Image (cartoon, rainbow, N blue to C red):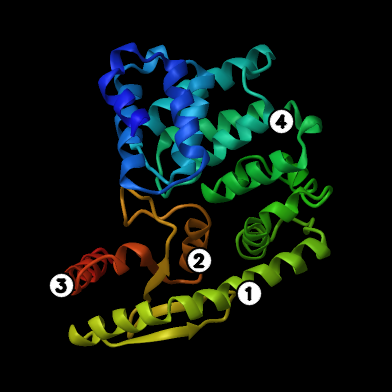
């Protein structure tokens, strides 16, 4: 690939602006392949080693590109959190406008909290964002409200400013943008029912009903499409003399794919894991695992696409590694 060669062989000639443009171009079509992963890994090192040269706008583009590609780079996230925390705190104290629009700030929040990774600097970054955004609460639109709500639920920080959260929550369903994010809206509503019942205002009924249809259709589709893989995993567990049940219906919105008997350990099938760290969950599935945790289950993800690509021996080793991490 010409663009890949350009990143490797002309690194010294690339400016922060051109690097961010390359990230944007590579992530736009979301082609998940090793050939596309390599430039991002290289760019993450460039960002880490030359961090001071990148502006806030460049870092926003790069981080949102990492999120689109499901690629997790810990040090990049921490460095970006530190820099933006300082920026938003300064803007908040001085009552200045940020270089990023409100919608871009919400996208950045989602990009930072998207991966299952807890860190003090992420918490500090989220607090500084919310403090800044509260001054512009009247200007926040539905798309931005959904992004902010989603990111706060992803990082379990709904409680940091109940007034601000309840205000942006009321904006969801006021236009038609929610129709583009039905899966996320359903998870927001489920989080409301499970995690923060103290919030009195509910999402509009027509939103909830429409999103629940999508949720249950996807659940049914998952059960059919993953059936062969589930039987394969069940066979591996039987060979390991591990007693288990499959498709366990619980008192809640989810079905447990595999429940290890006499424990609360659960194996859940998904494709929502980072592409460079296969055992790290992300996005919607991160919220689902947190809900299962609140129901008393300790769940681990099994990436179905990765599992399907392995030979029989490696499949068994993959399952063993996951079981060892309980």
Q: Is residue 259 visible?
A: no
Q: Closer to the camera, 4 or 250?
A: 4
Q: Specify the label residue 294 is tagged with.
A: 2
Residue 83, x across and y down, in percent: 46, 21
Q: Quadrant of the N terminus?
A: top left
The residue lying at 30 percent from left, 37 percent from top is 38
Contact? badges 1 and 3 (CB < 8 Å): no
Please tell me which residue is depicted at 60% across the width and 60% down the height of the picture: 195
Cα distance, mark 4 to mark 1?
Answer: 35 Å
Q: Earlier in the sequence, mark 4 or mark 3?
A: 4
Q: Secondary structure at mark 1?
A: helix
In this picture, is 214 found above or below 136?
A: below
Residue 233 position, x and y percent, is 30, 79
Label 3 belongs to which residue?
313
Please name the residue that numbered disc 1 is placed on: 216
Q: Of the residues under marks 4 and 1, which one precedes in the sequence?
A: 4
Query: Which quadrant of the structure image shows residue 243?
Result: bottom left
Q: Counting residues from the N terminus, which is met first, the one under dot 2 or under dot 1?
A: 1
Residue wearing tag 4: 134
Indicate the quadrant containing the C terminus: top left, top right, bottom left or bottom right. Answer: bottom left
Q: Nearer the viewer, mark 1 or mark 3?
A: 3
Residue 163, image x and y in percent? 73, 41
Q: Earlier in the sequence, mark 4 or mark 2?
A: 4
Numbered-mark total: 4
Q: Is residue 152 above or below residue 213?
A: above
């Amino acid at each position: 690939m010409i663009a890949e060669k350009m990143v490797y062989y002309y690194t010294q000639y690339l400016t922060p602006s051109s690097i961010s443009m390359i990230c944007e171009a590579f992530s736009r079509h979301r082609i998940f392949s090793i050939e596309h992963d390599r430039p991002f890994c290289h760019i993450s090192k460039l960002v880490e080693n030359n961090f001071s040269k990148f502006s806030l706008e460049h870092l926003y583009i790069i981080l949102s590109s990492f999120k689109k590609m499901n690629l997790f780079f810990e040090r990049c996230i921490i460095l970006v959190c530190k820099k933006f925390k300082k920026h938003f705190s300064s803007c908040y104290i001085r009552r200045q406008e940020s270089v990023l629009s409100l919608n871009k700030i919400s996208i950045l929040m989602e990009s930072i909290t998207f991966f299952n990774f807890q860190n003090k600097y992420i918490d500090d970054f989220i607090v500084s964002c919310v403090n800044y955004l509260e001054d512009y609460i009247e200007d926040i639109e539905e798309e931005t409200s959904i992004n902010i709500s989603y990111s706060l639920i992803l990082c379990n920080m709904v409680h940091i400013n109940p007034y601000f959260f309840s205000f942006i929550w009321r904006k969801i369903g006021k236009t038609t943008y929610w129709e583009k994010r039905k899966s996320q809206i359903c998870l927001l509503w489920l989080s409301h029912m499970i995690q923060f019942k103290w919030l009195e205002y509910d999402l509009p009924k027509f939103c909830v009903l429409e999103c629940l249809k999508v949720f249950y259709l996807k659940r049914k589709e998952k059960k059919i499409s993953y059936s062969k893989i589930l039987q394969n995993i069940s066979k591996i567990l039987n060979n390991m003399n591990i007693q288990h049940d499959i498709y366990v219906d619980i008192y809640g919105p989810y079905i447990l794919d595999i429940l290890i008997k006499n424990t609360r350990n659960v194996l859940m099938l998904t494709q929502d894991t980072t592409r460079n760290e296969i055992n790290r969950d992300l996005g919607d599935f991160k919220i689902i695992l947190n809900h299962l945790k609140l129901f008393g289950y300790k769940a681990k993800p099994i990436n179905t696409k990765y599992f399907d690509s392995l030979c029989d021996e490696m499949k068994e080793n993959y399952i063993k590694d996951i079981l060892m991490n309980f």
